[in-house]
Amino acid sequence: MKIKFIILIFIILSVSLITYGSNAIKDSVGKELIVKDNFAGQSFTLIKEKSKYIVVRKFFGSGVPVIAEVRYKVVVNSENQILFSKIIKNDSHIKLVKNEVFILSCIKDEIDLYLNGLKLVVEERLN
């Protein structure tokens, strides 16, 4: 219950801060955000399919470009923020942590990704 309350507070604060931003989520479609973790890494890409958004999460392997892929349903909070946690497709043998809640926000020219209220260090992959 505490986690849900903290996430709710974080969302409310984020929405109030985001209203000053000029960049919109729609401008982030197709941009791959790389998260460097203790393993080979992973990425998140916002995709628009028909009229709905989804997020594709890829897990990288050592010697293999992509070892797993997970797709999430997106909830649009505002034109500058989305939330995703519900898995709609899992082609992964990787055991995922339950109750992961991601928030993607765009403030000015900066794209931020949060996991359960903690900001992840990401960089945009340049094609």
Image (tube, rainbow, N blue to C red):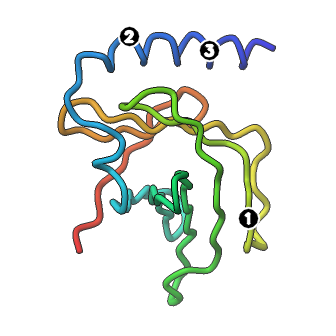
For the residues labelled 2 and 3, say whether their Cβ atoms are less than 8 Å apart: no
Determine contact: label 1, label 3, CB under 8 Å. Answer: no
Q: Residue 45: give x, y in percent of width and height.
A: 45, 60
Q: Give the CA distance from mark 1 to mark 3.
A: 26 Å
Identity of the residue drawn at 57% across and 10% down: 9
Quadrant of residue 94 in the image? Answer: bottom right
Q: Secondary structure at mark 2?
A: helix
Rendered position, 46 above or below 14: below
Q: Is residue 112 left or right of residue 68?
A: left
Which of the two residues, 26 or 63, is positioned nearer the viewer here?
26
Q: Earlier in the sequence, mark 2 or mark 1?
A: 2
Name the residue carrying label 3.
Answer: 8
Q: Height in image: 114 above or below 26? A: above
Where does the image place residue 127, in percent across and percent down from the top left?
23, 74
Crowd class of label 2 (few under 14; some 14 to 19; many from 20; radius 10 Å): few
In the picture of the structure, the residue carrying the numbered disc 2 is 16
Q: State the image coordinates of residue 46 (x, y, percent, origin top left).
A: 45, 55
| Disc 3 secondary structure class | helix
Determine the residue located farthest toward the bottom in the rendered image: 63
- Nearer to the camera, 29 or 52: 52
Name the N-terminal-most of marks 2 and 3.
Answer: 3
Q: Residues within 10 Å of mark 1 (few under 14, many from 20)?
A: few
The amino acid type found where label 3 is placed reads: Leu
Task: In this rendered view, identify the residue nearer to me: 89 or 102.
Answer: 89
Q: Which mark sits nearer the N-terminus, 1 or 3?
A: 3
Q: Amino acid at mark 1?
A: Lys
- Left or right, 96 with reference to 54: right
Discs 1/3, front: 1
Say which residue appears at 51% left-offset and 53% top-offset.
Answer: 51
For badge 2, the amino acid type reads: Ser
The residue wearing badge 1 is 89
Q: Quadrant of residue 22?
A: top left
